[in-house]
Amino acid sequence: MNILEKIAQQKGAFSKSERKVAEIILANPQTAIHSSIATLAKMSDVSEPTVNRFCRRLDTKGYPDFKLHLAQSLANGTPYVNRHVEEHDTPEEYSKKIFESTMAALEVARQSVDIQAINRVVDLLTQAKKISFFGLGASASVAHDALNKFFRFNVPVIYFEDILMQRMSCMNCSEGDVVVLISHTGRTKSLVELAQLAKANDATVVGVTAVNSPLANECSLVLSLEVPEDTDMYMPMASRIAQLTLIDILATGFTLRRGSKFRENLKRVKDSLRDSRYDKR
Amino acid sequence: MNILEKIAQQKGAFSKSERKVAEIILANPQTAIHSSIATLAKMSDVSEPTVNRFCRRLDTKGYPDFKLHLAQSLANGTPYVNRHVEEHDTPEEYSKKIFESTMAALEVARQSVDIQAINRVVDLLTQAKKISFFGLGASASVAHDALNKFFRFNVPVIYFEDILMQRMSCMNCSEGDVVVLISHTGRTKSLVELAQLAKANDATVVGVTAVNSPLANECSLVLSLEVPEDTDMYMPMASRIAQLTLIDILATGFTLRRGSKFRENLKRVKDSLRDSRYDKR
DNA sequence: ATGAAAATGTCACATAATTACAAACTAAGG
DNA sequence: CCTTAGTTTGTAATTATGTGACATTTTCAT
C-alpha cells in the first residue's frame, strides 16, 4: 500500500513527536526523500531516534528503507492491468487500454512460459530437416510471421494458409521433420487432424496452444501461453501478440544455437534487400 | 526519464567495470535497491568507489540518491527496458529479455503514438467503400492480421502478398477507398510505388511507417511508431508487435464507432466458427 | 502527589558512503 | 618492445549517516 496514504491514515495512532514528523513528511514529501535523518529530525523538531522509531512504526526496516518506500509512493505507480475497452471510450482511452492490456498480457505470458519446453523446441528446430508452420484464422498470420523469420535461416520452411495444402504437406512428412501448429484455443478440428496426420508420418509435432486442449493432446510437445484474453471485442488480440513473441523467442534461440558465424549470414540476408529499398537519406 | 532505460541506453558509454554494475542492476533491480553500496560492489565484483562513480555518471548525487531514482523507476510501472540478447544467454535469459524488450517497445510506442491521427484513420476506415492492407516481408504478416480483423466487420477488405496483385488492386481503386500500407522502414520501393498508384486513382493512402520516410511522404495520412529496434538479430521483432497493436487499436476504434448493434454482429461471426471446433470440454 | 508506563532525548557505536590518492591498465608514439 | 600520458580501478582513510542502549522527561491513573 502507498506509504503516504498509510501515514495519513495512521496519524491518529502516532505519539505527539511522531505526529510532528508525519506532518512534515506529508507537507513536503519531495523534500523528505532528499533529506538525511538528521535534517528531517531538525525540521520536525524532534530527535533522530524518534524519526527512526516513526519509520519502524510504518513497518519499514529503518530510515533508508522508509525513504525507498516513500520514493516509490511519489512515483505514482500505475502497473499495467488488463482493462476492458468500453462503449464510450475516447480514442485516447481505448488506445491506452489496448497498449496496457497487451503489456499486461505479455507480463502474464512471461511468467507462465515454460523455459524448459522452449529449450527443447529450439533443440528440435535446429535439428529439423524441414520445419512447417500452420495456423488458421488469426493464428495464420502468426504462422506467416514464423515463416518470415525462419525462412531467413536458410532451412527448409513451409507455410500454407490453404487447409488442403497443409494436409498434403503433413502427408509428406517424415522422421526429422518438425510441424508447428498454432491455435489459441486448441479446438480447431482441422488443426487437430493435421497433428494426427503429421504424427502418423513420423514428424515431431509442436503445439503453440492451450494446455489440455484437443490439439495439445495430439502434440509431441506443447508450448502454452496463459493469456487473459479480452473477449469483449470477439477478436484475438493479446493472445496473438504473446504467440508472436514466443515465435521471436524461438527464432532467437535458434540463431544463438547456431553461433555467431550463422548470424553474419543473417546480416547478408538482410543486406540482400538493399536494392529493393531507397537509401537512407 | 526512467533511470533503468537510461542505464540500458548509456551502457555503451560506460567503462568495463561500470558496465558490470549496470548488468547486475538491470538483471535484478529489485535486489539493488535493497542493497548497500558494499553489497552491490561485491555482487558486481568491483570496488565501492566504482559503484559510486557509476551513480554519478547517471547524474545522481551519489549512491543513496541513485537508489531513490531507481526505486521510483521501479514503482513507475515499467521495469521494462530494451535489453539486447547476447551470445551466451541461457534460454531463461533471452526469453526474459525478449519479453521485456517487447514490453518496453510497446511503452515507447504508446507514448509516441498520435491519437489524433488514429482517430482520423478510424474515421476514414468507417467510411471507406473498400479497405486494402499491403505489406511486404515482415510487414506482410501484419497486413495479413489486419485482413483477419477487418474481414469480420463485413466490409470489403483486400489483402495480397503478391506484388503484382497489389499493383492491380491499387489500379482499381477509386474515391472513397482506403489503402493501408505497412512498412517499418518506409523505404521499400514497391510500396512507395503502390502509394503513388493508389493516390493517382483517388484512394486515400494511410501509411503505418516511419515519419519522413519516402513512403510517408507519399501518404495522405501517416501513423508512425517510434520503436527502438533490436538490430542484433537482423529481424524485425518489437517494431512488428507495435504495428500489430496499432492494428488492434484501429480495429477497436472501428467497432466502437459502429456501435453496439454492430458488435453483436461480430459475435455472430465468431459463433459461425463453432462447427469447425471441438466443444469446450 | 506519586509511581508506573510511555515517550523522548543524549550519546556512543556501528554502518555506510565518499574522498584522496596510489596502483594498474591502455593506447599512442618513439 | 619499451615508454609515457591518460584513463580506469582499487585501497585506505575520512566523513556522514543511521541505530542501539540507556537516561531523562512526560503523562496519567491512583
Image (spheres, coloured by chain):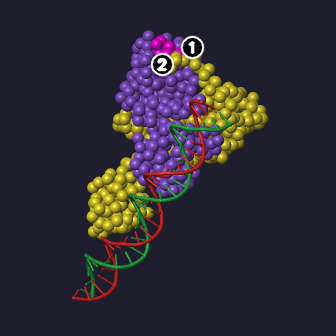
Chain colours: A yellow, B purple, C red, D green
Q: Which quadrant would the N terminus of chain A be assigned to in this image?
A: bottom left
Residue under label 2: A281
Q: Quadrant of residue A35?
A: bottom left
Instruction: State whether residue B36 is above or below residue A132.
Output: below
* Front position among marks 1 and 2: 2
Q: Is residue B191 magenta?
A: yes
Q: Which residue is mark 1?
A: B164
Q: Is residue A103 magenta?
A: no
Q: Around disc 2, counting alpha carbons within 10 Å, would you say few (fewer than 14), some (14 to 19), or many (20 or more)?
A: few
Quick check: B164 left or right of B10? right
> For the point 64% across and 41% down, which residue is it?
B88
Question: Do badges 1 and 2 share one subunit?
Answer: no
Query: Which residue does the image show at 44% across and 63% down from the upper left?
Result: A61
B139 vs C30, nearest the viewer: C30
Q: Chain of mark 2?
A: A
Q: Indicate the amino acid at tag 2.
A: Arg
Q: Residue at x 67, y 43 (%)?
A: A119
Residue A181 figure quarter = top right
Q: Which residues are magenta?
A: B189-197
- Residue A127 in the image: x percent, y percent? 73, 36
Q: Position of residue D16 (x, y in %)?
A: 38, 58
One can see residue B22 in this view: yes
- Specify whether B231 is left or right of A172: left
Whether the residues at callouts 1 and 2 have beta carbons within 8 Å, the answer is no
Residue A138 in view in this figure: no
